[in-house]
């Protein structure tokens, strides 16, 4: 790794950081003003709003890095070509492969960084962002633990609620138990219900039995057919939590969850597709680098490079990749393709196209 290698790396990194910073900033500004009015309805504090968007930065960057890498590759090689630097390198005996290696080295590091983000960092920051949005901004109860089979909530100060199972529609909770604790966090009362249903904009408990613990240790039992339940959560909230569950798992947790579902003979398509989608997407920057460098190298000897042309090419290619990737994931969700195939089909297709274009470059 000589002077030329580090020169190209510095040149490429500078443009890549500029592109990524600009894209993330534009995304955050648009998202901020889109959500600001909604957050202000809940009298949210500015610090909570800013922390929410700060926690979303890793996920946003993860989604935009492939586009930034593609744009930076096109612009970096284009500028080297415009300044006749690639021609000078070729005249000194430097091959196209050696010119490409610094770009691939940076793309490899970006891929490793994205794997770390999607494996650990993004699930944690997404969970924190969801907590801030739900609890601190919208003032809703905090989910202490949630899956569609097990929900724990902290409500009304010292009260805890456990739900054995949540319907997929989120409109019915099965086997509800409420624990009311005193200031010393000892049990004051226990309320059990067969179910809680959401009708006419409110929750209602059915077949309720309440056990009040008397100061002398006795227990008083009171029963009702129905009883209102003060719960600010809506079915949409419960469905959102359930839908986002894979996004809030690290890759290790997701892998363990998939194995557990397999042992229980349950469907794993949703989780398996999400697992391979996240892994495959981390390799997109490497593919986009090969593609961007190859397209730019096709114009060796010309000085027609422009920023507008590079951005236009990046937008077009990114749209095609997004469309193909979306179709593949949709087919995977429907069961028409295996999850692994659905997650990788766009990456493999663009990798083949990238290699084909690279082989057409004049050596």
Image (spheres, rainbow, N blue to C red):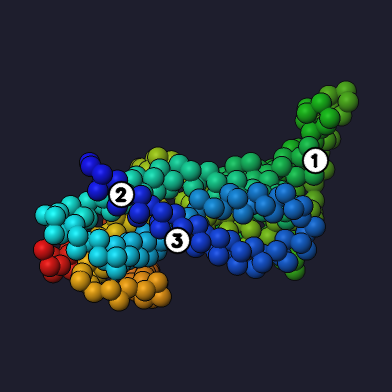
Report whether 89 appears left or right of 313: left
Regarding residue 218, the answer to whether it shows in the image is yes
Quadrant of the rendered structure where residue 73 is?
bottom left
Query: Which SS class for mark 2?
Result: helix
The location of residue 324, given as percent across then percent down, is: 32, 71
Regarding residue 354, the answer to whether it shows in the image is no
In this rendering, the answer to whether 280 lies above or below 121 is below
In this rendering, the answer to whether 103 lies above or below 121 is below
Q: Residue at x 56, y 60 (%)?
A: 25
Q: From the image, tell me which residue sits under label 1.
A: 157
Q: Residue furthest top?
A: 216
Characterize the local packing of mark 1: few (<14), some (14-19) or many (20 or more) Cα atoms within 10 angstroms.
few
Query: Which SS class for mark 3?
Result: helix
Whichever of labels 3 and 1 marks the residue nearer the N terminus, that label is: 3
Residue closer to the observer: 59 or 344: 59
In this rendering, the answer to whether 189 lies above or below 207 is above
């Amino acid at each position: 790794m000589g002077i030329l290698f580090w020169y190209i790396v510095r040149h490429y990194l500078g443009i890549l950081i500029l592109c990524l910073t600009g894209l993330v900033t534009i995304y955050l500004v648009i998202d901020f003003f889109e959500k600001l009015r909604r957050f202000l309805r809940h009298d949210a504090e500015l610090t909570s709003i800013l922390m929410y968007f700060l926690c979303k930065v890793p996920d946003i960057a993860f989604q935009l890095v492939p586009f930034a890498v593609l744009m930076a590759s096109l612009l970096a090689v284009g500028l080297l070509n415009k300044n006749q630097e690639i021609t000078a390198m070729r005249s000194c005996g430097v091959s196209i492969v050696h010119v490409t290696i610094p770009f691939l080295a940076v793309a490899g590091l970006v891929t490793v960084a994205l794997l770390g983000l999607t494996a650990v960092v993004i699930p944690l920051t997404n969970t924190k962002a969801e907590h801030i949005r739900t609890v601190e901004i919208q003032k809703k109860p905090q989910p202490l633990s949630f899956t569609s089979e097990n929900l724990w909530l902290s409500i009304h100060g010292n009260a805890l609620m456990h739900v054995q199972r949540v319907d997929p529609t989120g409109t019915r909770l099965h086997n509800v138990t409420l624990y009311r604790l005193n200031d010393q966090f000892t049990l004051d009362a226990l309320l059990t219900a067969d179910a809680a249903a959401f009708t006419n904009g409110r929750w209602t408990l059915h077949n309720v039995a309440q056990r009040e613990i008397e100061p002398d240790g006795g227990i008083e039992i009171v029963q009702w057919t129905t009883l209102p339940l003060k719960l600010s959560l809506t079915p949409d909230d419960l469905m959102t939590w359930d839908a986002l569950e894979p996004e809030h798992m690290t890759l290790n947790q997701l892998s363990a969850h998939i194995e557990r579902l397999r042992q229980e003979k349950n469907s794993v398509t949703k989780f398996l597709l999400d697992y391979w989608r996240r892994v495959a997407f981390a390799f997109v920057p490497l593919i986009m680098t090969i593609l961007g460098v190859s397209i730019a190298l096709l114009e060796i000897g010309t000085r027609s490079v422009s920023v507008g042309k590079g951005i236009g090419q990046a937008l077009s290619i990114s749209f095609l990749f997004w469309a193909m990737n979306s179709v593949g994931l949709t087919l995977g969700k429907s069961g028409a393709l295996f999850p692994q195939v659905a997650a990788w089909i766009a990456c493999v297709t663009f990798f083949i196209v990238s290699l084909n274009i690279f082989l057409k470059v004049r050596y």
